[in-house]
Image (tube, rainbow, N blue to C red):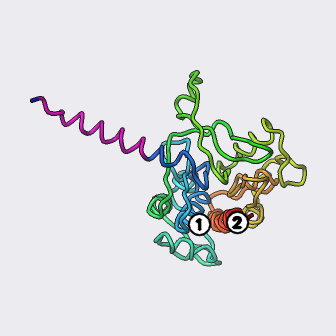
């Protein structure tokens, strides 16, 4: 009797588990594109409320711009009013005065990833969102492929994930919103109906507008974090992350309110 080799068992376990996970998330409530701080906070909050959430990250390591801190000095800064969000993820901080606190960047990135996953959100890394699904003026899904396939420009057709809500959390380029305005020709909730583009560094303004600009842009499409600021023409702010965390929490509230209203609609 020929028994399966250990190597075969291990490979089979990975294949079965991954494709079962992928199949369960072919139709979801919320697709978050980009596993940066705002997206991870929103993913945790929405998943804790019982919604099915998947995060699609094009890089191998989720966490966005947290890991490198400022110029590869792996510390980041948050303001006092963002500390309750850090506490929800178990992240330690140290006061440096003037309403500012420092956090270890690796601890913060790791905690946000683990917190989102523990809450029930699934993170698909090394997956590139290359298009969106549009029906009757509504964004209702994303088109995905492996990041290496995208980078090598291989002629490989993608797969589709349908979603009740799609979030652009891709950071400075606001890649998903760019697809929607360029390819779908849809107008979004901005002063011009399109993407205004990011302004230069002004930390105080950028932190404030990151939260203010977190909103629903058109039916089924939302933006958070630096993607939201880029869409609305806000300033950048560098390695200070309170606004990003609060953007994620605001986004979660918006998503859940809209999902509930949709479910209750006649």
Residue 86 at x, y = what percent? 53, 71
Decide whether the magenta segment is chiefly helix, strand or loop. helix
Task: From the top left corner, tell me how far across and down residue 42 is, in percent.
Answer: 60, 62
Quadrant location of residue 257?
bottom right
**In whole angstroms, how far apart are the C-alphas of marks 2 and 1?**
26 Å
The residue labelled by disc 1 is 77
Quarter in which the N terminus is drawn: top left
Q: Specify the label residue 201 is tagged with.
A: none
Residue 245: x %, y % from top left: 62, 65
Up the image or down, 253 lies above or below 158; here it is below
- Secondary structure under badge 2? helix
Mark 2 in CB contact with mark 1 (< 8 angstroms): no
Which residue is label 2 attached to? Answer: 254
Name the residue rendered at 44%, 47% in the picture. Answer: 21
Q: Is residue 21 left or right of residue 64?
A: left
User: What is the span of residues highlighted in magenta in the rendered image?
Assistant: 2-20
């Amino acid at each position: 009797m020929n028994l399966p080799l250990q190597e075969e068992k291990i490979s089979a376990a990975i294949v079965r588990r991954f494709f079962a996970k992928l199949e369960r998330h072919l139709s979801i409530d919320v697709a978050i594109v980009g596993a940066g701080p705002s997206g991870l906070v929103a993913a945790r909050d929405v998943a804790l409320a019982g919604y099915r959430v998947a995060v699609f990250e094009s890089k191998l390591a989720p966490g966005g711009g947290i890991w490198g801190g400022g110029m590869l000095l792996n510390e980041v800064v948050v303001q006092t009013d963002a500390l309750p969000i850090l506490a929800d993820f178990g992240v330690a901080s140290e006061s440096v005065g003037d309403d500012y606190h420092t956090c270890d960047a690796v601890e913060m990135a790791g905690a946000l990833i683990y917190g989102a996953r523990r809450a029930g959100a699934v993170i698909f890394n090394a997956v590139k969102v290359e298009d969106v699904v549009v029906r009757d003026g509504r964004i209702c899904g994303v088109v995905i492929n492996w990041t290496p396939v995208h980078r090598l420009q291989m002629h490989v057709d993608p797969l589709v994930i349908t979603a009740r809500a799609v979030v652009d959390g891709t950071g400075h380029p606001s890649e998903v919103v760019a697809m929607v305005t360029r390819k779908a020709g849809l107008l979004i909730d901005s002063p011009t109906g399109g993407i205004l583009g990011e302004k230069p560094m002004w930390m105080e303004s950028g932190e404030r507008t990151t939260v203010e600009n977190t909103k629903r842009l058109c039916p089924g499409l939302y933006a958070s974090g630096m993607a939201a600021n880029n869409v609305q023409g806000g300033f950048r702010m560098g390695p200070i992350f309170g606004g990003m965390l609060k953007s994620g929490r605001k986004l979660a509230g918006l998503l859940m309110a809209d999902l509930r209203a949709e479910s209750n609609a006649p």
